[in-house]
Image (cartoon, helix red, strand yellow):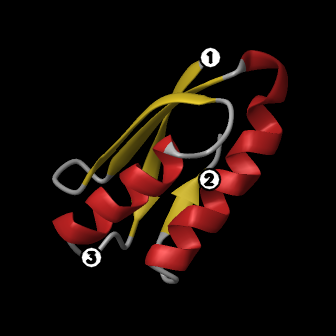
């Protein structure tokens, strides 16, 4: 499953790269892209565990940028 999410308060491109690298290392994630310019994040992960994986993605994002929010749809 591949989904795109809006990000709020992503402060810099370096933080976006750190988030992307951390998300790609998560078990079940096949690809991830975090764009500072568009303030969007795309995550491609295992369909059957997508919700659980997204909880881990949120933790990764908060570790790098505590003020950044993911708009979960």
- Nearest the viewer among 44 and 8 is 44
Indicate the position of residue 17 as horizontal and vertical percent values: 28, 58
Indicate the position of residue 29 as horizontal and vertical percent values: 59, 32
Residue at 30% of width from left, 70% of height from top? 15
Q: Is residue 7 left or right of residue 62?
A: left
Residues under labels 1 and 2: Cα distance? 14 Å
**Residue 42, quarter of the rendered image:** top left
Indicate the position of residue 20 as horizontal and vertical percent values: 38, 51
| SS at badge 2 | helix
**Residue 2, quarter of the rendered image:** top right
Residue at 54% of width from left, 57% of height from top? 70
Question: Nearer the observer, disc 2 or disc 3?
Answer: 2
Residue to which mark 1 is pinned = 1
| SS at badge 1 | loop
Residue to which mark 2 is pinned = 57
Q: Earlier in the sequence, mark 2 or mark 3?
A: 3
Residues under labels 2 and 3: Cα distance? 18 Å
Crowding at dot 2, Cα within 10 Å, few <14 / some 14-19 / many 20+, comes out as many
- Nearest the viewer among 69 and 33 is 33
Indicate the position of residue 5 as horizontal and vertical percent values: 49, 42
The mark found on residue 18 in the picture is none
Residue to which mark 3 is pinned = 11
Crowding at dot 1, Cα within 10 Å, few <14 / some 14-19 / many 20+, comes out as few
| SS at badge 3 | loop
Residue at 82% of width from left, 42% of height from top? 52
The quadrant of the picture occupied by the C terminus is: top right
């Amino acid at each position: 499953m591949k989904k795109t999410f809006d990000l709020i308060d992503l402060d810099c491109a370096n933080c976006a790269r750190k988030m992307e690298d951390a998300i790609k290392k998560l078990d079940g994630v096949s690809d991830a892209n975090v764009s500072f310019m568009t303030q969007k994040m795309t995550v491609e992960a295992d369909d059957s565990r997508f919700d659980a994986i997204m909880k881990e993605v949120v933790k990764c994002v908060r570790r790098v940028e505590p003020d950044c929010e993911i708009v979960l749809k």
